[in-house]
Image (tube, rainbow, N blue to C red):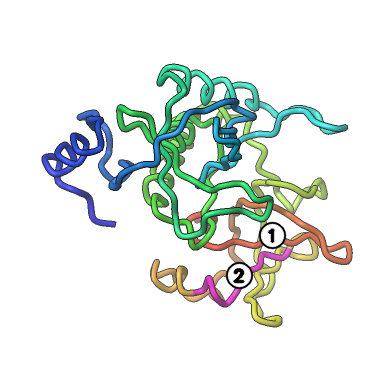
Amino acid sequence: MSALPVKRASLLGALFFFALPLFASTECGPHQLPDWQIVRHVHDGDSLKLADQRKIRLIGINTPELARDDQPEQAFAQAARMRLDDEIKRANNRVGLVYDAKLKDRYGRTLAHLFLQDGTNITELLLRQGLGSLVAISPNLKYNECYVNAQQHARKNELNLWRKGNTRIIDVDKSSSLTRGFQHVRGTVTNVGRRGRNTWLDLGDALSIQIADNDLEYFKLDRLWPLSHLQGRIIEVSGWIYTIRGQYRLRIHHPSVFHALE
């Protein structure tokens, strides 16, 4: 993604009725006229409701879950929600929505990147502070480079979710504690193969990583070594784990959500 020159970004900011802060990374800026709306309620760290009744799901991030039904609250769930709520209140409940290629998720929520009038990209802010995990789901990858860099900052500085002892990276080579839902996992690739219209990376019998054919282009464009070379390597991957016939599976859409360890 090419970065806008600083002077050009400032001009665009004036046209959009706000100025980008000088310290903001242009790769994270709105780059287009946002849809300005009033927030009615913040549900959690990555979803909210607008005054026009639309439910909004932030693109590029998954924050820890609040307690619901019989599931306990996850660490930093309240911190993520409170930070999102505080930022929105600071902006007098007015936010700018920038849409991506896909407008809605399977639950009917509107998918958007969220901005404040000073140019703050809310997803970037939460990821940079370690209050959520990177999500990269094609085709909504408009700010993926920005979000990758934000999470790398949080991990390098061991902030919040990434503090030593607080990260919930499950080592599937040593543990059988996988559950459905969003997870960070680590394991050895024991097989790379084709099944149906997918490439699969098997981490033993514990978990199968799915890459659909229509997502393979992202892996090629990022110049990753051929996926078959991952066999025998230890990888880390994050995403939503689901089960089919009792087997745990996880689909990834973009190479930015996994990496091979040295």
Q: Are marks 1 and 2 in contact (CB under 8 Å)?
A: no
N-terminal-most mark, 1 or 2: 2
In the displayed structure image, the side of residue 33 where residue 5 appears, left or right: left
State the image coordinates of residue 62 (x, y, percent, origin top left): 59, 41
The region drawn magenta spans 208-216
Q: Does the rendering let one see residue 261?
A: no
Q: Which amino acid, by three-letter code, is at mark 1?
A: Leu
At a point 62% along the width and 68% down the height, the residue shown is 232
Closer to the camera in the image, 82 or 188: 82
Q: Residue 211 has which mark?
A: 2
User: Which of the image's four quarters has the N terminus?
Assistant: bottom left
Q: Residue at x 72, y 65 (%)?
A: 208
State the image quarter where residue 157 is shown.
top left
Q: Disc 1 designates what residue?
A: 250
Above or below — where is 14 with respect to 104? Answer: above
Residue beneath the point at 38% across and 51% down: 145
Q: Position of residue 103 (x, y in %)?
A: 52, 55
Q: Amino acid at mark 2?
A: Ile
Please name the residue shown 16% across and 36% down the image: 10
Q: Quadrant of residue 61?
A: top right
Assign a secondary structure to mark 1.
strand
